[in-house]
Image (cartoon, rainbow, N blue to C red):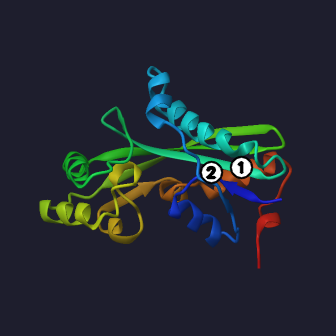
Amino acid sequence: MRIVLASQSPSRRMLLEQGGVKPVLRPANIDEDAVIASLADAPPAHTVAALARAKAETVAGEFPNDVVVGCDSMLLLDGQLLGKPHTVEATIERWRAQRGKTAALLTGHAVAYNGEWVTDTVRTTIRFGAASDADIVAYANSGQPLQCAGAFTLEALGSWFIDSIDGDPTSVIGLSMPLLRRCLYHFGLDASEFWVS
């Protein structure tokens, strides 16, 4: 029995590996915009959970005897859900809007085992530092935040610009290890069953 990660995120893989797990990597390819459009009036937490489940569902059939994990993160800033900025220009614009503000990072999780699902969303409060224009441009040009929800990471260069968080730091990195542990317990499994030496 293995943990299958329906994601191409190096941060999620790193969290599992640091937690003693050698995950099977099976990146999911879904049309995120279509999923979001189909949930136009849904609460933000429901939207990220639905994205996580859509990812996990694309690969769950291949791994009927394993634990399949899908995740998705988005930033809730001033009432608007924001995903990855993708470009340097969008990252600069995003950071100019969010610097000095408080927002919520929502990370949806969908975990499947033996035909049963647990779906949940973890909410973490993020306090963005009042980054200078020069630092915002340099951070955007580094490329690090372009593929990250909310245009930031807690690790690497992003560590300069996050003043504090309230909540689960692993969820901000991309996968809540405490939530995954609770999901495993729900299925009658122990986290230590998945540790490799």
Residue 58 lies, in percent from the top left, at 65, 41
Check contact, mark 2 vs mark 1: CB within 8 A.
yes
In the rendered structure, find residue 90 and report the number of the disc placed on it.
none
Residue 11 lies, in percent from the top left, at 51, 63
Between marks 2 and 1, how big is the CA–CA gap? 7 Å
| Residue at image location 27% in from the left, 67% down from the top | 142
Q: Nearer the viewer, residue 142 or 62?
A: 62
Q: Which residue is mark 2?
A: 6
| Residue at image location 73% in from the left, 48% down from the top | 183
* Any part of residue 39 in sight: no
**Left or right side of 80 for 5:** right
SS class, disc 2:
loop
| Residue at image location 64% in from the left, 70% down from the top | 17
Q: Quadrant of the image for the N terminus?
A: bottom right
Q: Amino acid at mark 1?
A: Val
Q: Quadrant of the image for the C terminus?
A: bottom right
Q: Quadrant of residue 103?
A: top left
Q: Which residue is mark 1?
A: 68
Q: How many marks?
A: 2
